[in-house]
Amino acid sequence: MMTISIPSVSKVFQSNAAVSAPSTTPFEAQKSFASVLKDSIDKVNEAQNQSDVMTEKLAKGENVDLHQVMIASQKASITMSATIEVRNKVIEAYQEVMRMQV
């Protein structure tokens, strides 16, 4: 059975701890958040590309197991769904902040 690890989640918590430290500047926090976000999007893209390659190999009749293709496809689907949900929550939080009265 294949295990799926999500190291980017732990990076987010680490970067949150770094943000609360008084020695962290806003620029460093922004840079850290941007790098975590970019790494996460790159991993989603990598999963999508791997799924596409395996599906293409299966369609061409190359020696690839059907169950491996399906696992890669589902992994790509789940990572994309999770990414979309995180995006939706971020947009919802942004809209809530914008509705606040000063």
Image: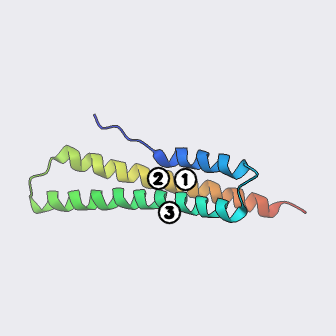
Examine the rendered structure and indicate whether residue 10 appears above or below residue 51. above
Q: Amino acid at mark 1?
A: Glu
What label sits on residue 15 in the rendered view? none
How far across and down, in percent of the image, does residue 97 sit? 78, 59
At mark 3, the secondary structure is: helix
From the viewer's side, name the closer residue of 22 and 96: 22
Labelled pair 2, 1 in contact (Cβ < 8 Å): yes
Q: Nearer the viewer, mark 3 or mark 2?
A: 3
Instruction: Find the distance from the CA under tag 3 to the CA under tag 2.
Output: 17 Å
Left or right of 28, for residue 10: left
Q: Which residue is mark 2?
A: 81
Which residue in the structure is indicated by mark 1? 85
Amino acid bearing label 3:
Lys
Q: Give neighbour class at mark 1: few <14, some 14-19, many 20+ (Cα, 10 Å).
A: few
Density class for disc 2 (Cα within 10 Å; few <14, some 14-19, many ≥20) is few
What's the residue at 27%, 61% (across, down)? Answer: 52
Instruction: Tell me the residue that label 3 is attached to.
Output: 38
Q: Where does the N terminus fall, quadrant-wise?
A: top left
- Give the Cα separation between the discs numbered 2 and 1: 6 Å
Q: Secondary structure at mark 1?
A: helix
Residue type of the residue flagged with mark 2: Ser
For the residue pair 96 and 41, the one nearer the viewer reads as 41
At horizontal 76% and vertical 58% (from top left) the residue drawn is 96
